[in-house]
Amino acid sequence: MSSKTPVGILGATGTVGQRFIQLLERHPWFEVVWLAASDRSAGKLYTEACRWRLNTPLPTPIASMKVSPATPEGAPKLIFAALDSHAATELEPKFADAGCAVVSNSSSFRTQADVPLVIPEVNGDHIELLRTQAWYKKNGGFIVTNPNCSAIGLVMALCPLHHRFGVEKVFVATMQAVSGAGYPGVASLDILGNVIPYIAGEEQKMEAESRKLLGKLNGNSIVPADVTVSAHCNRVPVEDGHTESVSIKLARQAQSEEIIAAWNEFRCVAQKLKLPSAPEQPVIYDPAPDRPQPRLDINRGAGMSAVVGRLRPCNLFDWRFTVLSHNTIRGAAGAALLNGELLKAQGYIT
Ligand SMILES: NC(=O)c1ccc[n+]([C@@H]2O[C@H](COP(=O)([O-])OP(=O)(O)OC[C@H]3O[C@@H](n4cnc5c(N)ncnc54)[C@H](OP(=O)(O)O)[C@@H]3O)[C@@H](O)[C@H]2O)c1
């Protein structure tokens, strides 16, 4: 009998669901015992229901597991959720209501007042907000979310600067990978040799989520940070990895060495607690003039670090730089896994 915490994956067949399976394969604390997806997949063996798209083999014990219907009956208490957002809106509250800890990737509840939107390195203290949820008070169930895949890299780069110098204004233009759209995602004829200057709802998510993430927990609510963010989101023909060009205005003047030190020295609760999925260095500054690049830098920190480069003065604001993060690891499954580990370390999951 395993001493690990049993976990389930909702939306196990999709792009993010597959990443969960990959990242959980040899996890020291958690063991996958339950997989669920839509009616199209329920009742099939996982290997039949899923088109495995990752470059590591599908773990043998998972391949022969049967996909369950997406209902709480028979599900374990800890659920990593990677559902399409329409399905998440309907299903995640049912699991929380049944007493499950739902650690969600979907946008459905990220900006709801009583739902923590958490990056452990940035705002791990916001997790306490889950105590205000009606489900938690009723039977210990709750929903905790991680941010949008393009907001996470941006906010990891902004957080250490916000703490030391105050960030007042942000302009960001993204170059987002196709895997960010799930599978099969964008048609190849639409994206090959092309740039699509529109991702539905993405700019609004980046702007609202950044303010909530950098905000302060005040009693039972979050006071959003007073940061103005203007986001321009683009889909580009890159497989994995969102690259972002960023300009910032700071409240207090800073030298480039101070900014680079703030990034490289940034450590938080996830590193102090030595959570299994926490990168040693959450933000890495690369001084090379032509980095970061998705193909070369996406797996730094096992895909959990944000890589920053090209810091230079900005003609509009104070400073400009480039940030890269892995959208399905740091921006999705890895982010949720780290939140699950923080919840476990802090006793919210037994
Ligand atoms: N891809 C990324 O980089 C990324 C990053 C951050 C956040 N997210 C968010 O994570 C979530 C999953 O994204 P994804 O890219 O993995 O999408 P995806 O590849 O389209 O997978 C969606 C998953 O949801 C399941 N599903 C759909 N409708 C369902 C229903 N009615 N009931 C139960 N299950 C249902 C699908 O099951 P079937 O296979 O049976 O249809 C599949 O397992 C989305 O909310 C997305 O916005 C994605």
Image (tube, helix red, strand yellow):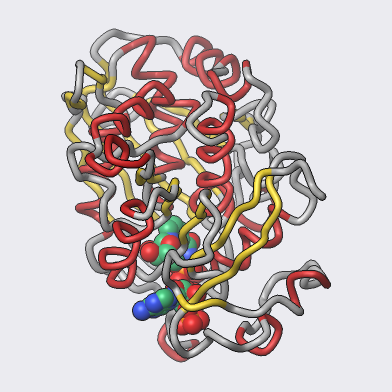
Residue 68 rendering spot, x and y as whole percentages = 54, 77
The reply, left or right, for residue 109 in relation to residue 332 is left
Occupied quadrant, residue 223: top left
**Quadrant position of the C terminus in the picture:** top right
Q: What residue appears at the point 20 percent right and 53 percent down from the top-left corner?
A: 204
Q: Is residue 290 above or below residue 179?
A: above
Judged from the image, the quadrant occupied by ligand 1 is bottom left
Residue 265 on image: x %, y %: 59, 14
Residue at horizontal 53%, vertical 36%? 349
Residue 52, by quadrant, is bottom right
From the viewer's perspective, is 121 left or right of 3?
A: left
* Residue 193 visible, this orientation: no
Pick the residue in front: 248 or 225: 225
Position of residue 267 measured from the top left corner of the image (x, y, whole percent): 57, 18
Residue at the spot 37% in from the left edge and 55% down from the top edge: 98
Residue 238 visible? The answer is yes
